[in-house]
Image (cartoon, helix red, strand yellow):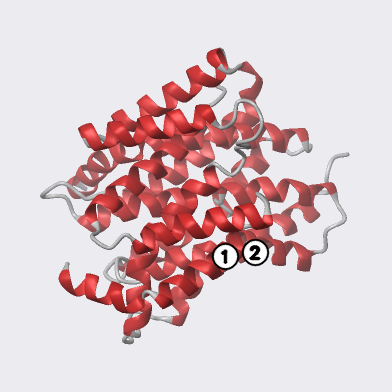
Amino acid sequence: MIPNASETLFIILTVALVTLGTRALPFVLFPAGRKTPEWILSLGRALPPAMIGMLVVYCLKGVSPLVYPYGLPELFSVALVILLQLWRHNTLISICGGTACYMLLIQMVFS
Amino acid sequence: MRKKKKALKAAFPHTIPVLLGYLFIGIAFGILLRDKGLGAGWAALMSTLIYAGSMQFVALNFFSGGWSLASIALMTLMVNLRHMFYGLSMLDAFKSMGRKKPYMIFSLTDETFSLLCSAQPPEGVDKDSFLFCMALLDHVYWIAGSVLGSLIGNLIPFDSTGIDFAMTALFVVIFVEQWQAMRNHLPALSGVGAALLCLSLFGPNRFILPTLVLIAGLLALFRKSMAQEADAS
């Protein structure tokens, strides 16, 4: 079935507008001209590490530790990324090393 | 012009992990969208206007019919609610951005947010232009990936299974960096802890919303100790 063009366009515009709304709301509620409440600013400072932590879990949400390969490719690769990052502090090396390790593991070792 | 070029040059290396991740995930999206009967033009339109990775995958379901615009709007709101938290974190950083500010707000994806949190411009490079270039490059990668997927998705010559791990790795790297930069690890721990708890309680498809609520609650609880942290740093 080929979707109807105008319907498709309305769907896309709806998703785009609501998505923009979720991104813009904080800036509408707390405009730059007025003083932002201190507790909002302190929440804003504490949020990034919490959000990044959540995103790490979000990326790994498909892992099933009880079913083969027990999340081992993810575990080894994430550990490698952490070690590389602590050792060299070079984002690119850590990411390329971890990704290459993961690809090798799921394609060759745990395939 | 020189200023912009310099900022673009400085921004590019920081965006390489996103380039890998967005190209791969974008290609996957383009292929799936074409399977729904929507070609490269639609892929470009969606990736330009919506520009939200996971949301666009969810939106694929909307094209099969049976969804009212109201339920689509509600679903979108639920999936993207986390963006509000990104905005709250960027209130200060975007204050000085002037004409670039609306675009910075529009383009605040998970990955761009994480780069904005972590990447620092080298000396002599205008910070606002640097941040803007990272946001713009990410957007271009995403559009290019989805269009490529629609056009040549089946022709990839090597087995690229698992290359999307680049995105996971990017978040892990930023997590490690923030961990080392902050003395108070409560925010980082509450993010991971809340997400793991809600994942085990609610399953992989509906844990983000309760996680956000729990994180907000925990951070409010820890506010005092974190205010001291902010004063100390």
Residue at left 61%, top 47%? B45
Q: Position of residue B210 (x, y in %)?
A: 60, 65
Question: Which residue reaches farthest front?
Answer: A66
Find disc 1 in the rendering and name its residue.
B81
Q: Is residue A15 left or right of residue B192?
A: right
> How far is disc 1 from disc 2 in space, using C-alphas?
5 Å
Residue at left 48%, top 57%? B193
Residues flagged by tags 1 and 2 on a common chain: yes
Residue B206 visible in this rendered orientation of the protein:
no
Residue at left 68%, top 62%? A14
Q: Position of residue A96 (x, y in %)?
A: 37, 27
Q: Chain of mark 1?
A: B
Disc 2 crowd rating (10 Å Cα; few below 14, some 14-19, many 20+) is: some
Q: Chain of mark 2?
A: B
Above or below residue A80? Residue B56 is below
**Which quarter shows the C terminus of chain A?**
top right
Do the numbered discs 1 and 2 sit on residues whose CB atoms are within 8 Å? yes
Q: Mark on residue A36?
A: none
Above or below residue B220? Residue B44 is above
Above or below residue B80? Residue A39 is below
Q: Mark on residue B78?
A: 2
Q: Is residue B76 left or right of residue B8?
A: right
Residue B74 visible in this rendered orientation of the protein:
yes
